[in-house]
Amino acid sequence: MRLRHRLSIPAVAVVLALAAGAPVRAAGADEALALVPPDVASIGVIHLDALRSSPFAARLFSETDDLAVDGDAAKFLAETGLRPRQDVDTVVVAGLSSNRLHGPEDGLVIFQGRFDPSRLENAMEARGAIRKSTPQGDYLLLSDAHGEDNRAAIAVLSPRLVVAGSPESVTRALSARQSGGSGFLRGEGLGRQVYRVPSGASAWAIVDATRTPFAGGARRSEDGDAADALVGAMKSVSLFVFHATTHGDSLELSATGISADAETRDLLEDALKGVIAMWRLAIHERSPEMVPILRRFEIESDREGVTIHGTLPGSFLRKMAEEHEAHRRIN
C-alpha cells in the first residue's frame, strides 16, 4: 500500500500509551510530545535509539552518513560536535496543516537526544541565522536563498531538546514549554488516540484522514482494480494508525484504518485482501522470497476499524539494505 503523508521539514530527519483521554505515556518521548500542539493533523514518532541495532535502520543511517561527507554539512557537524547517528534518540514530526499552499512551514519537528546548545547556535549564526526574542523564549531564524517567506526557525531548548519549523510553530512550542505542556500528553486532540499504539513501538504515526490528502479526490492506481478499490475505501476512513516494532533483527508492522461505518470497514477489508493477493501473484517470479512473508500478513476487523499486520524477517531487511547500498554506490 502506498499510504504516505509526506511532511517537508527543514531538518536532519523524518516517523506510538493508555486509555483515551488519559495522560499519554510514550516511553522516552514525553518531553518532546509535551510540545506537540493538540490541533495537529498528523503525528509521527521515530525512536532511533530503538532502531539502531536493527537492519531496518541501515538505510536511514546511511542517508545520515551521506550528509556527513558533504563539505558544509561535515563542517557544520564538526563545529557543533553533533553525531546524528549516536546523538539523536527520538524524532517527533507533527503536521500542523494539510493546506498544500502553505508548504513546509506547516510541519514541526522535535529532536530529543544529546546536543551542545552553544555550539549549535554559534554554528547556525555563523551561517546567517538571526536570533529572535519572544516572551516565550529565543529562537534562530535561518537564512534561505528562496526568500523571507521560506525561512525556518530552530530553537535549542536544552541539551536534550531541539525544535524546528516555521517561526509560528516554534513559538507555539516555546509557549507550550513555558506553560508546562501543550495538552497533547493530557489526551487533547490526536493525543486521545495514542492509546491505539503499543507503548513499546519503535516508530508510529497517527493521521487524521479528514484533514489530510487521504480525504481528497481519488486517483486511478497503476496496480489495477484491487488497488483502486482500496483507494476508494480509504476516502471514508477517518483515522489511520501505523506502528512498527523491532524484535531482534525483524520488524513487526501494523496499519489500521478507523471508520464508524460498517460498510466502509467491509470494503476496506475486502480491498486489502485483494491487494495482498494481487501482490503475491505479481512477485511470485520476481521476488519469490516475499511470497511466504505476505502469506503471514493478517487482516482483521472489529467494530472500529480494519488492521493489517505482519512481520518482515531480518533476512529480508538485510537484503533491502544491501540492495539500497549497491544502488547508492552505482549512482
Image (cartoon, grey):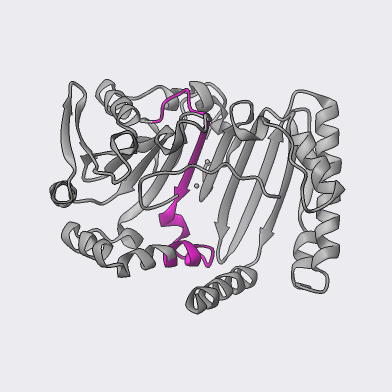
Give residue 59's position: percent from left, percent from top: 49, 65
Left or right: 12 as drawn, with respect to 175: right
Give residue 46's position: percent from left, percent from top: 46, 48
53 or 257, nearer to the observer = 257
Q: Say if the magenta span includes residue 164.
A: no
Q: What residue sits 24% from the left and 58% below the top? A: 82
Q: Is residue 172 above or below residue 327?
A: above
Left or right: 324 as drawn, with respect to 302: left
Q: Is residue 217 visible?
A: yes
Q: Residue furthest front?
A: 146
Q: Is residue 273 visible?
A: no
Which portion, as a residue range, is magenta?
Answer: 36-62
239 or 79, nearer to the observer = 79
The tally of labels here is 0
Q: Say if the magenta span includes residue 58.
A: yes
Q: What residue sits 76% from the left and 55% below the top? A: 297
Q: What residue sits 71% from the left and 50% below the top? A: 1
Give residue 123's position: percent from left, percent from top: 16, 52
Q: Is residue 325 above or below residue 46?
A: below
Left or right: 310 as drawn, with respect to 66: right
53 or 225, nearer to the observer = 225
Q: What residue sits 67% from the left and 30% below the top? A: 215
Left or right: 61 as drawn, with respect to 269: left
Give residue 10's position: percent from left, percent from top: 36, 45
